[in-house]
Image: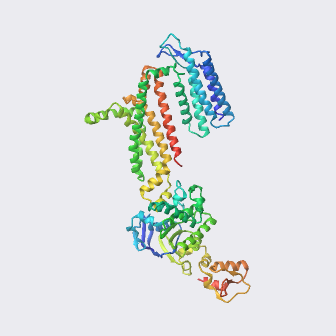
Amino acid sequence: MIRFDGVSHQYGALEALRGVSFEVPAGALCVLLGESGSGKSTLLRTVNRLIEPTAGRVLLGGRDVAGIDPQALRRGIGYVIQSVGLFPHRSVAANVATVPRLLGWDRPRVEARVDALLEMVGLDPGAYRDRRPATLSGGQAQRVGLARALAADPPVLLMDEPFSALDPGTRRGLQVALRRIHAETGKTILLVTHDLEEALVLADRIAVMAEGRLVAEGPPAEVLGPGAPEAVRRMVRTGALALHRLAALPAAGAAEDGPALGSPGLPAGATLEDALLLMLAHGTGSVSLEGAPPRHLSMAAILRASAP
Amino acid sequence: MTALIPLALAAALLPPLLGWISIAPNRLLSPRAAALPGNPPVLAAAVLYYLSLLGTLLSACRPRLSWLPEAATILAILFLSATVGLGTAAALPADSTVARAAPAAGAWLSLLVLSLALAAAAVMRGGMPALPLLVGLFGLTVLGATGVLDSLSLMREAAGRAAELRDALAGHVALSLAALLLALMLAVPFSALAMGRPRLEAAFLTAASSIQVIPSLALFGLLIAPLAALASAFPVLRELGLGGIGPAPAILGIAAYLVLPLARGILSGLRVAPADLVEAARGQGLSPSGVLWGLRVPLGAGVMLGALRLAAVQAVGLATLAALVGGGGLGTLVFQGIGQLATDLILLGVFPVLALSLVVDAGLALLARLVPA
């Protein structure tokens, strides 16, 4: 869906991007992970041509974006930024309707779309439609920002540190909402963050950037796996990498057949991290997986699964 | 509001101490303070004046209705004017047609103090000072229309020069408006051009501010020679009314002063929209003109209107000097009055300039309030 092909960008003497190549498959939620200054935001903005690569190209659905009129291109891509960027002099509804209006949709269609989107991001349209952005909390404003980005039903969503300015509780709520929306709509999402935990919660795929280069790319368990590159290891506390890896691995993958009598039950879809936490909480060496046929998971299995 | 108390007390004491009215044998001789005649209408007006002042004092001490001090002060201004008007009517010698009457120092100073109190009360209430002053001015106009002030020298001067006054006022408005439009025609495109080009902006603003250091009269004078040369080289221009003397140098000169406040206001207005908001708007696919008209202009409208207000008031003030280069306007009356040492004639020019400034200021301030922040 999105293919970076040797993308480089130079700000004067500074090389912000150095030949980045990888592909985000259609329908994936790919997290661009890196420290500040790693070039991840710059890379994101080459997709909607807010930044033009000085070498290489960006393909969107097989077309080189350099050949698409920037305004038409941007109207077909949802864009969410950290500071939200809602227009303060317009109502919530008018903000969400920005791109549909630019595309010339008729009024009833725009209004129906606005209400449906507010609903989708978890805001009651009746209560929020006519409010001004200044009256919203940070989390509500970012929900409106998300609705605005989805307004014209673009196949691709670009999100630049969308939740970084929010407090942890609000951030978790929005992460859950984003996962749900991603599952419901099947959008291709490219999201920039410097927060490894956020990446683990959200990502199907993680692309790790350092000093303008792509250092690792793939499913989370693979990127954080035994062969994780130095740049990835630097991002986590010594020893914590293994712990984070547990969060990326499903518990079902390490389970063994047969029941474990008297051990606490683990819900289906849980990760190895959840299993370990449950063992620690109950002081037991094994947990049983809920569902049929009966399966269980032991501490030894967790150790095997996460071994470098 | 307690700051109004000393002002109200001063307004109460000044007329009896320094005189209410003054009489001069004719238009040009200096007036002398005269006693306030004690006939019933004069006394009634004076009593109402003191009652109004008492109202100002009491409402300032115990604020209940926020606009009460302003209303009482406006009444005080009107009753003081009525006292002076009725008093001079009674005090003018019946046999003389050339004798002139005017408010004495005490009455003038009281009017000044009360105007100050009015503006202060409006500011303390959180309102615009121009608005109650305009209401007071309107009240004085109505009072003038009733004939109560007819015996005042100023009103006689106005009656004798009604046509001249009307022309001067119309000319003044035309000069200010023309200069403001010309300055806008320069400032708007230059600001648009300088936006995002810091070096051009610096050069342009430096040029515009260097004009500010030239005294206005000198600038008008400097324009006379080139404009005269231009007009003699191209007779077509002379046909159009351009020349070294007349409205042309005045309009050009005034406009030159207005370019700086306008351009600075427009440029800072365009910068009100924060950079990340502009970035978000571009990311949504807004065109450059969409960003300008949908974001920068609405968010900067308050700042830009503020600059327009400043420039418009400045235009009204500067247009007074147009008379010195033959440009007409209310300055004609002022400078004639100075030349003849006739105070009333000066005031006849000055009061409409003041009123015009207040109207422009209040009008544009009201407009700015309609713009959502």
Front residue (pair B204, B277): B277
Residue A66: x percent and y percent?
A: 39, 68
- List the single residue furthest toward the front: A108
Q: Dividing the picture into quarters, in which one does residue B43 lie? A: top right
Q: Residue furthest top?
A: B95
Give the camera-side residue of A226 and B279: B279
Left or right for B323, reference A87: left
Measuring 58% from the left and 31% from the top, which residue is drawn there? Answer: B116
Q: Quadrant of residue B210?
A: top left
* Residue A14 shows up from this direction: no
Q: Relative to B65, is A143 on the left or the right?
A: left
Q: Quadrant of the N terminus of chain B?
A: top right
- Please count the marks in the image: 0
Q: What residue is drawn where x is 69% and y is 78%?
A: A278
Q: Is residue A121 above or below residue B86?
A: below
Q: Is residue B197 above or below residue B121?
A: below
Q: Position of residue A272 (x, y in %)?
A: 63, 80
Residue A117 quadrant: bottom right
Residue A140, visible in the rendered structure: yes
Q: Residue at x 65, y 78 (%)?
A: A274
Residue A100: x %, y % from top left: 47, 62
Q: Is residue A229 left or right of residue A246?
A: left
| Position of residue B149 measured from the top left corner of the image (x, y, whole percent) | 53, 22
Q: Is residue B133 left or right of residue B203?
A: right
Does B59 sit above or below residue A273? Answer: above
Compare residues A151 and B187 and report the one nearer the observer. A151
- Decide: is B152 above or below A112: above
How does the figure colour the protein chain or chains?
rainbow
